[in-house]
Amino acid sequence: MNPMRKYRYTAQTHVGLKRKINEDAVLALPEHDIWLVADGMGGHQAGDFASRLIADAVATIPQGLDPAARMHALRDAIQTAHQAIRAEAATRGGGTIGSTVAALIMANQHFVGLWAGDSRIYRLRNGRIEMLTEDHSAVAEFVLAGKMTWDEADQHPQSNAITRAVGVGEELEIDKVRGGTVPGDRFLICSDGLTKYATFAILADVLGSTPLETVGDRLIQIALDGGGADNITAVVIDVL
């Protein structure tokens, strides 16, 4: 018998200081142990449409699925959203509408992260922060080639140029990361509106020292204090 892991979470989003519309979407489905952040793009009410569509598609996953079926349902929901966003873009005259997605699913003593774009999943374990995803972005190539760190990439002028998004291109390739969980693990899913302002060291400090009740506010405040140029979304999940 695997003892069931239980989780506590907080999920928050903020429009930031410069944008009129929040194009980020956040979804918590504790009954499925699924959490998701999507960061839309396209302007003119298109980015928020795209991110919301992903969240709404995932929210329709039926109850009672086993872990493998739940993961497939999550992937299928994101692919369904991809086609629906493409269809909407065609209806609107063919401009680019899209959204990142970063989704975390827990089952037994394991996690699976699915993502496309530059929204990220981190894990804090024993005081050490680890980025579990790799941005699909122009500057990520420099990081993966050892030419700069992720912190440096976040400050690069091209940091917003993502190379993969839900709703963009014919086929959507969704990347996957998986691993085990232990009690005390703390996961963060966030949009780049946070990571532009929060280095690995800042995230490790805040996630390591702040109780769940206030950690979301604290993360959002860091981005606002830094300038809040983008929408800011953060989900923190604690493994009990």
Image (cartoon, rainbow, N blue to C red):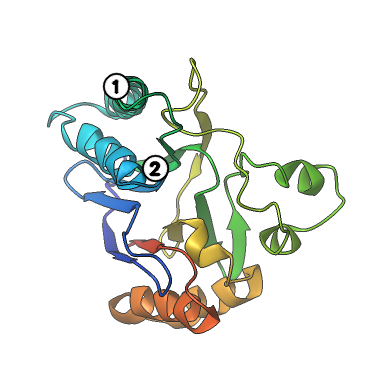
User: To which residue does mark 1 refer?
Assistant: 91
Residue 175 placement: quadrant: top right
Element carrying mark 1: helix
Say which element carries label 2.
Answer: strand
Q: Residue at x 86, y 49 (%)?
A: 146
State how far apart marks 2 and 1 are (Cα). Answer: 28 Å
Q: Nearer the viewer, residue 92 or 213?
A: 92
**Farthest residue, direction left:** 63
Residue type highlighted by circle 1: Thr
Disc 2 versus disc 1: nearer the observer: 1
Residue 187 at x, y percent in the picture: 44, 58
Asked if residue 98 can be seen in this view, the reply is yes
Residue 1 visible? The answer is: no
Q: In the displayed structure, does residue 150 sit left or right of residue 115?
A: right
Q: Which mark is residue 103?
A: 2
Mark 2 or mark 1, earlier in chain:
1
Are the residues tagged 2 and 1 within 8 Å (C-beta)? no
Could you say where residue 217 lies in the image, as x and y percent from the top left? 34, 78
Residue at coordinates 55% horizontally, 72% vertically from top-left?
A: 203
The amino acid on which the numbered mark 2 sits, given as a three-letter code, is: Ala
Q: Quadrant of residue 231?
A: bottom left
Residue drawn 39% across the image and 65% down it: 19
Question: Which quadrant is the C terminus positioned in?
Answer: bottom left
Quarter that holds the N terminus: top left
Q: Quadrant of residue 41?
A: top left
